[in-house]
Structure formats: structure tokens, C-alpha cells
Image (cartoon, grey):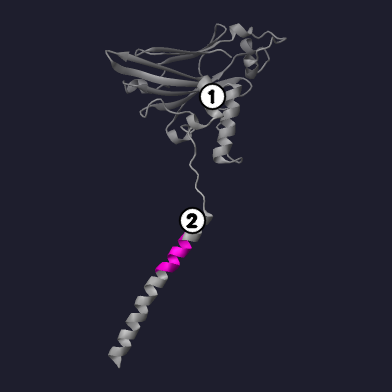
Amino acid sequence: MKLNSFIVDSLISLLKVPAYIVFLLICTACVSTNSKIQLTSSAIDDPKYQPVLDKWRKSASTYRDLDLILKTTAVLISPEMDELYKNRFIDIHGSQAKFDDKIILSKDTISVVVDLFTKSEAHLDLSDESLWKIQLIINGIMIRPQSIDRYRKKELLSPFFPLSSSWSRYYVLVFKLPFDLLMGNEVKDLFEKKELASSLPNPQDRTIVLSMNSGEAQVKFSWDP
């Protein structure tokens, strides 16, 4: 009798196992049906963002004896770039997410997002004033950076400003424009094409030049608002 009871219990246990597996499969199918995963498109695949990014993104590279010495890109945060960056940021992170104030255009500051690769490890430090002389030049006025911040978490910027090299470092350069340039106007006014009833430079004199000079290389990027 005991043997028969053991056999019956064993058979019942074996029957429960397939039933349990079937139950798990059904539950998994239900979860998969009701869930959705969508990959975030890259900046260069975003049809609205990519053309504006290309407009305000400049690149440069320097070789010595066929050896890459420096490769860098710079994105000027113009009013147009600022708006598209904010829109893409909200699309990715939601309307409650907080923008980085260093990147956003303000009344008297303008930012440049730089990614930099140099063969010299020391020159990778863009904030080292003994190695790099950086300035923004507008209408002959030279402006030194108010701040130079390195972004160690590349994931914070790569969805918006693609790296030129997997070994690059991200920096955000913030420049505070002086009163004698703005004369009471705002940075965004520099990008207005129409003649302004103010003492701002004429449109042809508003070319913005970023100069980055070191013992390794001298780089200049220019944008025509």
C-alpha cells in the first residue's frame, strides 16, 4: 500500500510541473503583450534635430606624419540649437526633467559644447590654463570662458552631441558677453538678421569665433549667425 501511495504521489507531482510551466508561459506572454520598449534614436537619426545640429557643429583634426594629434568638434548653442536641444531633451526625459543651465542660452551668456581628443594625455585637460588659451571673439572683442566644465558621464551629452571619437572628452564652455558688446541687448539679438535699432554690430560683423590654442595645435571654429 505504501509503495502504491508513493507512486501515485510521484505521478501527481510530475503532472504539476508541466502545468506550472504552462502557467508561467501564459503569464510571460501576457506581460510581453502589454509592455513596450522603444529605443531612443541617435541625434544623427533624428530628422528634426540632425539638420540643426549639422548647422551649428564644426569639426577639426590635425595630423603629424600621418599620426592623429588632435580631433575635436564644437557645437555653438545658438537660439535655434537651444530650442531643438530642449525639445529633444523633453522627448527623451519627459517634461519634468531639468535642463543643464550651463548649456541653456541666457540673456548674457553663450555656451559651446566641445568634445576633444588629443594624443597627448596632458592636453586632454581643456581646463588647464597653462596648456590651453581659449577665447571667444565677436566683433574684435575677445572673451575668456567664465567656466570650463568636463562631463565625465558621457551618457549625459552623447544623445544630443555625438562624440567625434570614442576616446574624446566632453566639455561645456560658458562665455559671459560683456556690456560693451551687448549694450543692453541679449545674446539672442546677435542672431537676428534684421537691422536692429541699437548699437549691436551689423550682421556681417557678428561672426563668432572660438579660438583654442595650445602647444599641440591652434584650432579656430567660426559661425555666422
Residue 110 screen position, x and y as percent: 57, 20
State the residue at coordinates (55%, 40%): 93
Q: Is residue 16 left or right of residue 45?
A: left
Q: Residue furthest bottom?
A: 1
| Number of residue marks | 2
The quadrant the C terminus occupies is top right
Determine the CA span between mark 2 and mark 1.
Answer: 36 Å
**Badge 2 or badge 1: first in the primary sequence:** 2
State the residue at coordinates (64%, 13%): 182
Q: Is residue 184 above or below residue 204?
A: below
**Residue 131 in view (yes/no):** no
Residue 9 screen position, x and y as percent: 34, 83
Q: Nearer the viewer, residue 224 or 15?
A: 15
Which residue bears the numbered disc 1? 51
**Residue 16 in view (yes/no):** yes
Kindly report the secondary structure that dominates the magenta region of the rendered protein. Answer: helix
Q: Is residue 47 above or below residue 220?
A: below
State the residue at coordinates (55%, 23%): 77
Q: Is residue 117 magenta?
A: no
Q: Nearer the viewer, residue 75 or 147?
A: 75
Q: Nearer the viewer, residue 174 or 88?
A: 88
Q: Residue furthest right?
A: 197
Q: Is residue 70 above or below residue 168?
A: above
Residue 183 screen position, x and y as percent: 66, 12
> Three-letter amino acid code at disc 2?
Ser
Q: Which residues are magenta?
A: 21-28
Instruction: Check disc 2: other Cα within 10 Å, few if <14, some if 14-19, many if 20+.
Output: few
Could you tell me if the residues under marks 2 and 1 are in contact, i.e. CB atoms within 8 Å? no
Which residue bears the numbered disc 2? 32
* Disc 2, SS: helix
The picture quadrant where one finds residue 126 is top left
Instruction: Check disc 1: other Cα within 10 Å, few if <14, some if 14-19, many if 20+.
Output: some
